[in-house]
Structure formats: C-alpha cells, structure tokens
Image: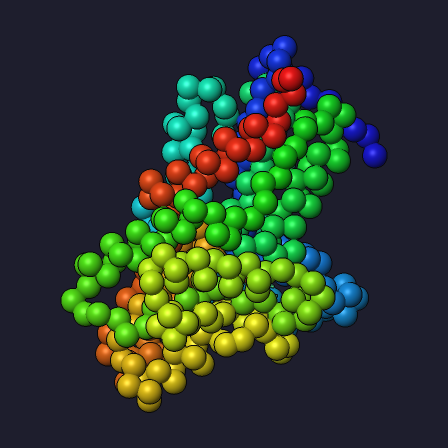
Amino acid sequence: MAFVYRTPRTPIPLNGRTGVLLINLGTPDNTGYWGVRRYLSEFLSDRRVIEAPSVVWQPILQGAVLARRPFESGANYARIWDKEKNASPLRVYTEKQAELLKERLSNEDVPVAWGMRYGKPSIAHAVDELMDQGCDRIISIPLYPQYSATTTATANDQLFRALMKLRGQPSVLTVPSFPDHPLFIKGLEESVRRKLASLDFKPQRLVVSFHGLPKICVEKGDRYREECERTTAALRTALDLTEEQMPLTFQSRFGPMEWLKPYTAEFVSKLPDEGVTKIAVITPGFMADCIETLDEIGNELREEFEEVGGEKFALIPCLNDDVAAIDLIEDLTRKAMRGFSTAE
Ligand SMILES: C=CC1=C(C)c2cc3[nH]c(cc4nc(cc5[nH]c(cc1n2)c(C)c5CCC(=O)O)C(CCC(=O)O)=C4C)c(C)c3C=C
Ligand SMILES: [Fe+2]
Ligand SMILES: [Fe+2]
C-alpha cells in the first residue's frame, strides 16, 4: 500500500493543534430505493454489525434483504425526513451539535468536524478536514452514550482505517461511552420534566426504550446491556421513580435471532390490559432523534399502543441540539484535551 502524504492547507503549529471529531451512525442520502439500498448495504455488510461469515451473509443481504427492505425503510425515512434541509434528522442534529460545539471552543481555536460511520460525510473526509486545519491530534467522540461493539467499536475501527493510509498520522484519543455521566443524566432529567409539564395528562409509566442488540452479542461479552442499565438506574434515581414506574425495554429487532428483552413493542402492547393507558417513552440510547425514535417509537409504537386501547402517548425528544447536549459534549472534549497534554 502506498501511504498518502498531503501537505495540510494550514501548517501544524509548533506546539500542535487539537481538533474534535464527532461520529454518529449515518443515514441514507435520500429516501429513494437506491439511496437507502446503498446505505443499508454498507451498514449491514459491517462485520461488527452482522458477524455471520460473508460467504453466507452476502448472498442473503444482496438478494432477499436488499430487494425489499429499502422500500420499507425508505417509506419510513420519508415520514421523518427534514424536507427543508433535505436530510435525515440524525444528520441535521449531528451537524448542529458540531456547529454549537465549535462555538463553545472558539476561544481556544479548536476545529470541530463530524463524520458518519456509514454514508456521508465519511469519517475519512472529516479527518482530512481537521488535518487541513493543522490538527496533529484528534479527539474522537462516538456519539453513543452506551458502548457496543456494533456502534462504538466500529466507529473507532473506521477512524483507524482512515489513518492506516496516512504517512503523517495524527495522535488520536477516542472518548469512552458515557452511560451515567452527570451532565447526560441531568439533560435527560430536565427533558423529562419539561415534557411532562407540557402534557395534559400524567403518564402512568415512563417507558425507557433502547436500541436492541442480538442477545448473543451480550453473551459474548458486549457490555451494552449493563451500560443501558446504568443509564436507566441513574435516571430513575434523578426522577425518583421505581423500576415499575420506569421500565427498561429494547426496540428494533432485525433478523430471526433472539434480541435483548423485554421487547418494547410487546411490553407496551400489554399495558392497557393492566390498566395502564397513559404512557411517555424516552430513548436515552440516542443523542439525536432519528428514524428509530421518531418513526419506530413516535409513529409505529404510538399506533400499536392506541390499537390495543392505549389513550395517551408522549415521546420525550432526544437531547439533540439542546444546551444540555452541548454542555455534555463540551465536557467530554475538555476532559479529553487534558489527556492530550504533554506539559509537565
Ligand atoms: C443487526 C442489525 C443491527 C444492529 C446490531 C444494530 C445496532 C445498533 N444500532 C444503533 C443505532 C441506530 N440504528 C439505526 C438504524 C438501523 N439499525 C439497523 C440494524 C441494526 N442496528 C437498521 C437496519 C437500521 C436502519 C433503519 C431500518 O432500516 O430499520 C439508527 C438510525 C439511523 C438514521 O438514519 O436515523 C441508529 C441511530 C445502536 C445504538 C445499536 C446497538 C446498540
Ligand atoms: Fe441500529
Ligand atoms: Fe428500528
């Protein structure tokens, strides 16, 4: 392999320069069949996400799965698409988080870039952007509050894949997950209190819904479930709610395997029979609203709940571009910056 050397547009200052890279999952470029197919093909070909051997999985993926799923997913994306910006909410909020973080760091002249694990803008593009601004050290923040090999680790893999090609590599600090960071929990607590104050009903349950994961991943050592439990326990304490009042569930199954339980849709569908007809749902596995929160919970779960007798349903928004989200990301950045210091 030929290693690339590109002269940065801005030379590296004598004492170095730190830049911040925000990483999120990624999203299709448009809601059409080919746009969604390209995105799903890249996503579901990731061996961190589907561990089955390629010779087995690729024919299934490129055949049955990608013949159908882009139509379904495209229609779901179309329901939540930001038409003004012609982008998915995940992309819009991630860009906004990067802009607002940049403002917070403007006195220190710390460049901020953002990249997506799948689709555009790529992580490699974001690294180029930072290096062009003279950065020889990068703080990388995967925007997943709870660690999973299927999200955090693959974001890190992709960053190091980009660096593998470079002759002059920057130093990199990858920020760990932050399941019960006090600013994260405070942001969630405030968002719950704000939403509850705006409702014309008092929810009987605050259902917590995290993205699911095949059970086998946890059995093999992925610490995701444990970190979801840490987030939930800290938020219960902050809101002074019991396990019954604030149950933990997992949404989004894919494929025939068993995933983490209880499944959100099954759990919520049983509530009206138990006399629970008014609920609020919070999704603290996501730093930004996306198809999983706005469509799967905000549209699909709401409809399912109402069909079985649910009367009132509220979705608590993710932290998105709230001050609380930027306070948290700024704190993660500033603490990581200390880790980069080489001063005595
Ligand atoms: C085997 C499949 C999947 C695993 C494992 C998985 C883990 C996982 N994903 C997130 C966060 C997000 N996932 C999103 C969308 C999404 N996820 C899968 C499949 C798996 N995820 C699919 C097929 C899709 C696409 C949508 C669809 O077709 O249903 C998103 C939203 C992206 C957006 O553009 O809005 C996020 C965010 C986590 C946190 C996680 C493991 C812990
Ligand atoms: Fe997912
Ligand atoms: Fe989903």
Q: Which quadrant is home to the C terminus?
A: top right
Say whether residue 262 is visible.
yes
Say whether residue 31 is visible.
no
- Residue found at the far bottom of this picture: 273
Name the quarter showing ligand 1.
bottom right
Decide which of 85, 167 is in the foreground and name it.
Answer: 167
The residue at 65%/66% (across/down) is 218
Q: In which image quadrant can residue 57 be found?
A: bottom right
Q: Which quadrant is home to the N terminus?
A: top right
- Residue found at the far top of this picture: 14
**Residue 307 position in % (x across, y down):** 31, 83
The residue at 38%/85% (across/down) is 270
Q: In which image quadrant can residue 165 be found?
A: top right
**Residue 90 position in % (x across, y down):** 44, 50
The residue at 51%/63% (across/down) is 229
Q: Is residue 190 left or right of residue 331?
A: left
**Residue 133 position in % (x across, y down):** 56, 20
Name above or below for residue 147 compared with residue 13. Answer: below
Color encoding of the figure: rainbow
Decide which of 237, 199 is in the foreground and name it.
Answer: 237
The residue at 37%/53% (across/down) is 188
Q: Is residue 7 left or right of residue 90?
A: right
**Residue 82 position in % (x across, y down):** 35, 51
